Image: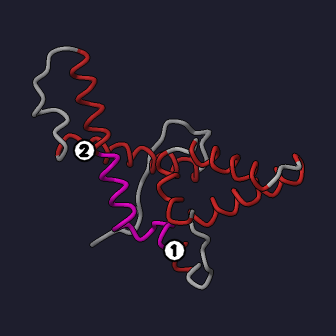
Amino acid sequence: MRNDYLVLITTDLTLSEDDIIRIYGKRWAIEVFFKVCKSYLKLTKSFRGLSFDAQTAHVAIVFTRYTMLSLENRFNLDVRSIGELFYWTCDELADITYLESYLLLIELMLSICQDVLQLSEEKMAILLDQFLQNLPAMIKSSLKPCA
């Protein structure tokens, strides 16, 4: 026979029932984290380094691997992922693309510069070229098709 209740015991009698459940939920997530790191990501058994720096680096690498796997799991398998829910509810709305948003910002900047500084078309072209040349490479490469 299966019971449909869970017993949580605490020594802090000042906590409310909701606080006890919330704290236990956080503690359980930590327990699962260490269990996965020890059992599947070889936190304890495979590493043989003796220096403190090597041990610290190994722990950091294992924790980073756990974080990456958890994110992948959350985005692809977990039904609670808000990302998919958000996209399902916004299907009808047209999204502005990354590129379109940059172009709108550049047009706004040019318009304001021309109004405030009273620059000629030639000077505006020079200003735009200087601006585009100083952008980070990632942004520059995405703007090239539109130039």
Q: Is residue 22 magenta?
A: no
Q: What residue did someone put label 2 on? A: 35
- Residue 109 picture location, percent across and down: 76, 53
Q: Secondary structure at mark 2?
A: helix
- Residue 66 picture location, percent across and down: 30, 46
Give the residues drawn in magenta, as a range: 66-85
Instruction: Give the residue furthest to the front.
Output: 122
Vertical relation: 88 (above or below) 16:
below
**Label ID, residue 85:** 1
Q: Is residue 70 magenta?
A: yes
- Most foreground residue, 80 or 113: 113
Q: Toward which corner of the image does residue 39 lie, by quadrant?
A: top left
Taking 126 as reference, is 20 left or right?
A: left
Vertical relation: 95 (above or below) 117:
below
Instruction: Give the residue furthest to the top.
Output: 51
Q: Closer to the observer: label 2 or label 1?
A: 1
Name which residue lies at 13% across and 21% down.
Answer: 49
- Most foreground residue, 94 or 78: 94
Which of the two discs, 2 and 1, labels the residue nearer the N terminus? 2
Name which residue lies at 23% across and 29% down.
Answer: 58
Screen quadrant of the C terminus = bottom right
Q: Amino acid at mark 1?
A: Leu
Name which residue lies at 54% across and 36% down.
Answer: 12
Q: Residues within 10 Å of mark 2 (few under 14, many from 20)?
A: few
